[in-house]
Image (cartoon, rainbow, N blue to C red):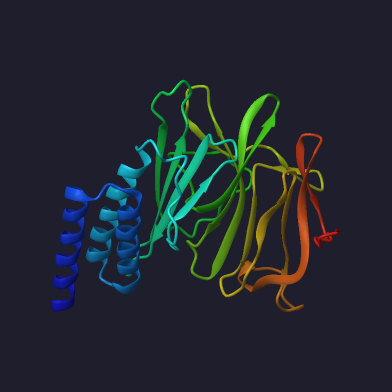
Amino acid sequence: MKKVIISIILFVYVSNGLTKSQTSPVEMSDTLGILFGRLRTNSVDDVLLRINDSIKSIIESYISSDRIFTHRFSNLRYLGQTASSDSLVKIITWNLVLSNEPGRYFCYFIRKSPERKENTVYRLTRSYTEKPIMADTIYTESDWYGALYYDIKPFFKDNKQCWVLLGINYSNPLVTRKIIEVLSFTPENNIIFGRKWFNSDGNIKCRHVFEYSSSGIMSLRFGSDTSIVFDHLVPLSPSINDGRLYYGSDYSFDSYIFQNGLWNLNVNVDVRNKQ
């Protein structure tokens, strides 16, 4: 109980100090580092939620600043920060792990507005759920599945601007999911996830979702401006034909190549640097 009281006192001290005096990116970074560290060392949900409220308060101040597209926090391991090369979309994201209730994802999409108008911010929050991420479904802000996105690239198709996202989902403690996603916006400025863009042997899907054992490791990255490279997943035992709990990498690689307006699946590719 004493430890909980001390943690709450420290939380109030840090929060008040930030509100009164800290405004620079360096001070924000230092405080965020302290707060994320406390998320990892505390186990009481009420304390974790209070600490997370302080993190949200700092991020809210940061995303509304003029420097959001020119600045990146350094040395913050648990805060995701990625921006598109066209400088039109930036993503800030993290997750909160709780003991007695489902964990939560927090994701901010900041879309640069033209003509020096105020940027548009989409604040997405989702609790962990073991419900699978559907490959053939268009998701919106209201039914977003929850993920941490770590890379983004802009693309055009049919004169429509989109962004391809790479993300990871930890909602199921036994199965890790990685996602190749497509982000776009409606004429009404609503955020949309998914586009019929991924061709696997004639089966065209809105996204590609990988599922594998949470004890395993899988790489998923952009190979170039027109390729996405990832580990080939197989059953860990020849006798297992189903159940992604038992899937992992066999150290070969597959890829999606952007050709003729679609991302086309290629199996067993050579990803060595040919130079």
Q: Position of residue 161 (x, y in %)?
A: 62, 30
Residue at 56%, 65% (x, y): give it. Answer: 176
Residue at 53%, 26% (x, y): give it. Answer: 186
Outermost residue on the right side: it is 274
**Eyeballing the image, is 63 above or below 237?**
above
- The residue lying toward the viewer, choosing from 13 and 261, is 13
**Eyeballing the image, is 188 above or below 107?**
above
Q: Position of residue 131 (x, y in %)?
A: 50, 56
Residue at 57%, 75% (x, y): give it. Answer: 215
Total residue callouts? 0
Within the image, what quadrant is residue 229 found in? bottom right
Q: Quadrant of the N terminus?
A: bottom left
- The residue lying toward the viewer, choosing from 254 and 101, is 254
The reply, left or right, for residue 31 in relation to residue 127 is: left
Q: Position of residue 177 (x, y in %)?
A: 58, 60
Res. 81 in view: yes
Res. 1 in view: no
Within the image, what quadrant is residue 264 found in? top right
Q: Position of residue 214 (x, y in %)?
A: 56, 71
**Eyeballing the image, is 123 above or below 103?**
above
Within the image, what quadrant is residue 235 found in? bottom right
Q: Quadrant of the C terminus?
A: bottom right
